[in-house]
């Protein structure tokens, strides 16, 4: 008789976010497969209370509580990441805040289901070193990397020629380039295919998201940058592909629903019954692909450059981008200023090794400060002109 897969106990970082809530949905839908041991959010106590109310068995923690010592909160999160009761750590907190908890979990030898690509972008070398040293694994949640991962199952490393990441092109794929100057926050947050948190939605509009994913793929799959290509696929049905040395291409297809890649990561190496509807190929009729326009989406080449430069350059790219997107969402920068301000930071940054958490955090801080304090020539000129 076949043995049943055992219950997996999860610690979830970013429990109240878009990915976090979908993880909770899956735990509720598959109660014999998953249980929540701990729920961690940033500062929104009310939202955490709602999630914790549905999972009273889980410890609930805030990283930035309104009252109390933030160092105590960081220590409590560190303990949760290393808790022997936890079988799998799910990292889905927005951005760089996820780095220290991820490293703690890896040091404790935990396997990680990783949504937060920024962790690998900032500190890919460090993460890989921790994985090697402690024997932990990362199961990707990002839909593109999940697709590539699934295409690679059962394949030999030497059989892979290149990885092909697909991207929808976001809301501005067909918008006249000259009108990007007037993009509003609401327009940048209106993604045509995916419903996600605000930071990644803006990254999808600049396609910095795809640039970050190139670096993420490099570290996850140990493939050189020249062998990672990006292609625009507006329907978001083919989630990514792998080309093999014999000329075959394998692709993974699915409707644009993050429940599916999350379930693949949580249940690996099993597949769960009935997570999502498979796409109806006859109804879809046609899938289209087009080359990425480097003038419309300069962020992809910029991220690739930072990745190839290595050391702390990707951490600078990531920190500068997080800061520029936050300023845009606060109404303090225009959409078209995001990528140039990240470029200025990457170009001005001193080179450095990224082999310690301290070095990565210092590069991140430097980049954020650079973006806050440097304004491009055109903006300076505009601010002097009468409104
Ligand atoms: N959404 C998607 O479909 C999608 C797809 C692929 C990859 N991803 C990646 O997944 C990550 C999460 O994205 P999202 O869209 O789910 O973001 P989101 O909706 O903005 O949620 C972010 C979550 O992180 C929590 N958080 C903030 N600071 C924290 C801290 N210091 N410690 C612990 N938790 C903290 C937030 O809690 P508070 O609200 O309390 O601050 C919230 O629960 C991102 O890296 C994104 O690139 C997302």
Image (cartoon, rainbow, N blue to C red):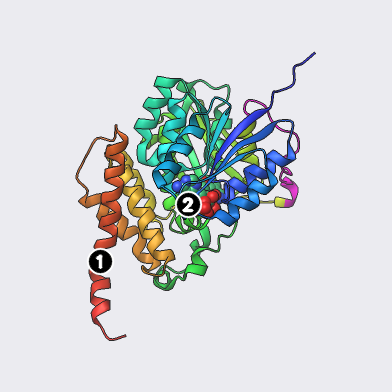
Quadrant holding the C terminus: bottom left
Q: Position of residue 23 (x, y in %)?
A: 63, 42
Residue 94 - label: none
User: Is residue 269 toward the left or the right of residue 301 in the image?
Assistant: right
User: Could you classify mark 1 by the number of other residues whose Cα lies within 10 Å: few (under 14), some (14-19), or many (20 or more)?
Assistant: few
Q: Is residue 270 magenta?
A: yes
- In front of the other: 301 or 81: 81
The earlier-in-sequence mark between 1 and 2 is: 2
Q: Secondary structure at mark 2?
A: loop
> How far across and how far down the image is residue 160, in percent?
47, 27
Query: Which mark is drawn over residue 65?
Result: 2
Residue wearing tag 1: 376
**Residue 144 picture location, percent across and down:** 53, 41
Label 2 crowd (10 A; few <14 / some 14-19 / many >=20): some
**Which residue is located at x 45 percent, y 55 percent?**
203
Number of callouts: 2
Q: Are marks 1 and 2 in contact (CB under 8 Å)?
A: no
- Residue 13: give x, y in percent of width and height: 52, 42
Q: Element under label 1?
A: loop
Relative depth, front residue between 88 and 262: 88
Residue at horizontal 25%, vertical 66%?
A: 376
Q: Is residue 357 magenta?
A: no
Q: Is mark 2 within 8 Å of ligand 1?
A: no
Q: Quadrant of the N terminus?
A: top right
Magenta segment: 268-283
* For discs 1 and 2, the disc positioned in front in the rendered view: 2
Residue at point 42% right, 72% down?
A: 179
Does the image show residue 191?
yes
Q: Is residue 126 above or below residue 323?
A: above
């Amino acid at each position: 008789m076949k043995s049943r897969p055992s219950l997996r106990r999860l610690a979830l970082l970013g429990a109240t976010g878009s990915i976090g809530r979908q993880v909770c949905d899956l735990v509720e839908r598959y109660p014999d497969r998953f249980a929540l041991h701990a729920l961690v959010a940033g500062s929104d106590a009310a939202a955490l209370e709602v999630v914790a109310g549905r999972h009273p068995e889980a410890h609930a923690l805030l990283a930035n509580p309104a009252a109390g010592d933030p160092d105590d909160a960081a220590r409590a999160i560190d303990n949760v990441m290393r808790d022997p009761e936890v079988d799998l750590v799910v990292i889905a907190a927005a951005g760089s805040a996820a780095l220290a908890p991820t490293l703690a979990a890896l040091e404790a030898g935990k396997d990680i289901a990783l949504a937060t690509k920024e962790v690998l972008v900032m500190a890919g070398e460090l993460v890989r070193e921790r994985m090697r040293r402690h024997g932990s694994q990362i199961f990707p949640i990002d839909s593109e990397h999940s697709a590539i991962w699934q295409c690679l199952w059962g394949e030999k490393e030497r059989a892979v020629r290149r990885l092909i990441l697909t991207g929808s092109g976001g809301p501005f794929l067909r918008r006249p380039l000259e009108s990007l100057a007037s993009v509003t926050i609401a327009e940048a947050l209106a993604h045509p295919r995916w419903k996600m948190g605000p930071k990644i939605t803006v990254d999808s509009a600049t396609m910095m998201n795809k640039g970050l994913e190139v670096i993420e793929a490099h570290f996850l799959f140990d493939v050189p940058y020249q062998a990672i290509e990006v292609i625009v696929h507006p329907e978001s049905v083919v989630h990514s592909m792998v080309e093999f040395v014999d000329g075959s291409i394998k692709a993974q297809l699915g409707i644009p629903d993050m429940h599916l890649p999350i379930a693949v990561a949580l249940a690996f190496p099993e597949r769960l019954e009935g997570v999502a509807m498979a796409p109806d190929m006859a109804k879809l009729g046609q899938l289209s692909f087009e080359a990425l326009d480097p003038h419309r989406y300069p962020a992809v080449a910029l991220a690739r450059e930072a990745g190839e430069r290595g050391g702390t350059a990707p951490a600078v790219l990531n920190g500068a981008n997080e800061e520029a997107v936050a300023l845009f969402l606060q109404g303090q920068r225009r959409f078209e200023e995001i990528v140039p301000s990240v470029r200025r930071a990457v170009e001005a940054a001193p080179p450095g090794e990224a082999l310690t958490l301290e070095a990565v955090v210092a590069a991140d801080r430097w980049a954020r400060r650079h973006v806050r304090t440097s304004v491009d020539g055109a903006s300076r000129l505009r601010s002097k002109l009468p409104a």
